[in-house]
Amino acid sequence: MKLTNTLYRCLLACAVLLPLTHLSSQSAEVYPTHWWTGMKWNQLQLLVHREGINKGNPTATISYPGVQLKKTTRTESPNYLVLDLAIGATAKPGTMKIQIQSAGGKFSIDYQLKPKRGGAGKEYANGITSADFVYLLMPDRFANGDTSNDRIASYLDNTCDRTNPSAHHGGDMQGVINQLPYLKDLGVTAIWMCPVTENDMPWKQEPAGAISGYHGYWITNHYQIDQRYGGAEAYKKLTARAHEQGIKIIQDAVYNHVGDEHFLFKDKPFADMFNNWPVYTGSNHREEALFSGYTSAADKKVMLDGWFTPHLPDINLRNPYMANFLIQNSLWCTQEFGIDGWRVDTYKYCDEAFMNRINAALLAEYPTLSIFGEAWANTVAGSAYFTRNNMKVPFKHNLPGTTDFPMQSAMLTALNQDFGWTEGVNKLMMTLAQDVLYEDPRRNCIFLDNHDMDRFMTMIGGDLKKYKMGIGMLMTLRGIPQLYYGTEILMKNDNVQGDGKKRNDFPGGFPGDAVNKFVASGRTPEENEAFQYLRLLAQYRKQSKALTTGNTIDFLPQDGVYAYARQSGKETVLCIINQTRDNKKVLTSRFEDLFRGYSSAADITNGSQLPLTGEWQLPPQTMWILELK
C-alpha cells in the first residue's frame, strides 16, 4: 500500500505521541507510593519523579471526592513535580487519578488511598518499654532462610561471600522467621534489626578498607525493602509471625545520610536537599558543640552538616521537601509494615528542630509507638541532652529515650577496672546517680555491646564470671535491656580488626555450617551455661515488676562491693556485685531499712535461701540477685 506524504507524517506523529498521551501509571514514580484515609497526617506531599516532567509549564489536576490539590511546585531538577494534597475526613479508600500535562505530553497516575489499618497499640505500634528485652541482629549475618535471594542480578553489588567479612553473606528475613521460636525461648520480646531498606550500592572504600553495604546503613530508596532480605513481602511476613509469637519489631531509621546511589542524590530535586561544602568536610563528631554554652557557630555547623564519609551524602533536614519526604516515609513504614518502634541511627548528627518534628508526627499518629535514638555521647549530660531531660540547655529535645552509651561504659568499667574512688563499681554508681538529668531513664536502651564495637566477650577477655556479672547488670538495672546477637553463646572477635569481624555469622544460621548453636546439642558446655544463665534471668525478668518498672535504691560501694535494689510495691530484688578477686563479707545490717517486712532472701539463679541477719560471704567476681521473701 502506497502512503501519501501527508498520511505518513500524520502516522509518524501519532506513533511519537501515543506513548506519552496514554502513558501507564508505572511510568512515573510517586513518593509516598500510596497513602491511607483516616490518617492524622492528612496534608500529603507527593514527590512525582519522571524524566522531563518539569519541562515547559507543567500542570496537575485531581478529581476525587474529599481530596484537594492545593499546590503544584516545580523543582530545580526537570524530572520532578511536588504536589500538595489535602485528604479530607470524607475521602474514601480507592484509586484516584492524577492528571499531569507537561511538555512531554499528558499522562495519568493511578494513586491508591487505602483504609488505615486498625489495632494500633494492640496489633502493632505497641512500643518498646522497660518491660521488654530487645535482641539486636544484623539480618545479613544472623540466618539465611532463602538462598534464592543471596544475589540480585539488577543490584550494583552481586557478591555473596562468607569468607570475606566485608561482603554480603546471605542472611535474610526468612532466616529470622525460622529462628523466632529460639528467640522466644530465650526470653526475647522485641527484635531490632539493622536497616532492611534498600542498599543498592557498589563496594566503597573506607579507612579500614573496601566494604559492601551488607550492614544496611547506605539507603538508596526509602520505599523499597532490600531484595536480598526478601523484599517487602518477607518483611510483612516477619512482622506478622513475630507478633503471633508476642515479639515486637523495631525498625532502624537513618535520617542523617543516604548512600550516594540514592535517586534523590543522583538527581536532586533541589540542590540544597544535601549539605554542600566547597571541599569535602567531615563531622567533628563532638556533641558538646550542640549543648555547650561556649561553642562556636562554626563548630556546631561542622558537627551537624559535616559528612561521615564521601560516599554518604549528608542530608539537609532544614530543606522542607526533604523533611516531609522523611517524615512521611516514617509514617508510611509504620503503617505499611506494622512495626512497633523506631531506633534512630546517628541521632546526634541530625538537625534538632527536624528531629523534634518527626518524633512529634510519629507519636501524634501512633501514641503507643516508641522511639530511641543513637547518641554516642561522651558524658551523661551529653546523652541526656538528646532526650527529654531536666537540664537548662539551649534546645529541648522531645526524644523519649536514647541508647545509653555512658551506662554501657560504666558497666564495662565495673567489670574490667580495679576498684577506686572513681573507678570500678564506683563508676557504675556515679553514672546511675546522674540519672537526675533524664526525665525518665527507664526509657533508655542499655547494652553491653552492639554492632559498632568489639563483642562483649572480647572486651572482658572471655571471662565467664565477668560474663555472668555483666548479664546480671544488664537484666537488673533500669532501662530497656538490649542484647547483641550471639552474646548468649559467647561469640567473640578476638585478635581481629574491622567491623565485619564484630558482625560474625551466627553458627548454624547458614546452609553448610559445621555446627548449629541455635540448639543445645550444638553448643559447648560453657556456651550452654551462658545461654541458660541469660535465659533464666530473661524469663524471670518478664514477670518481675521490680526489675521492669520498679524504683532503684542503691548503697554506696564499699571495698569493691556495690549493692542496689529494685522495688515495686511489695516486691524487692536486691543485687550485690563483688567485682574483686577476693571473698568479701557483707553485713546484712547495712540493708536493715530495706529488709523490713521480709524474713529471707532467695537467690533467683539457684534457689538458695539466705537469712537476713548476720553477715554474708560473697565470692570473688560474683553478682547475687536476691528476691526478698
Image (tube, helix red, strand yellow):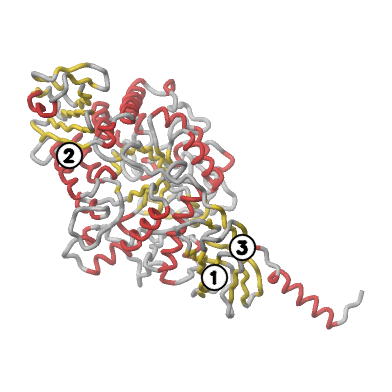
Gap between marks 1 and 3, in whole Å?
Answer: 12 Å
Quarter of the image where one finds residue 457: top left
Q: Look at mark 1 in the image and give the residue it sits on.
A: 69
| For marks 1 and 3 on the same chain, the one whose residue lies earlier in the sequence | 1
- The amino acid beneath tag 2 is Leu
Gap between marks 3 and 2, in whole Å?
Answer: 58 Å
Q: Look at mark 2 in the image and give the residue it sits on.
A: 428
Q: Look at mark 3 in the image and give the residue it sits on.
A: 96
Gap between marks 2 and 1, in whole Å?
Answer: 57 Å
Q: Are marks 2 and 1 in contact (CB under 8 Å)?
A: no
User: Which residue is rendered at x = 54% and y = 43% of the image?
Assistant: 234
Q: Position of residue 489 (x, y in %)?
A: 36, 29
- The amino acid beneath tag 1 is Leu
Q: Which of the image's four quarters has the C terminus? A: top left
| For marks 3 and 2 on the same chain, the one whose residue lies earlier in the sequence | 3
Q: Position of residue 386 (x, y in %)?
A: 27, 54
- The amino acid beneath tag 3 is Met
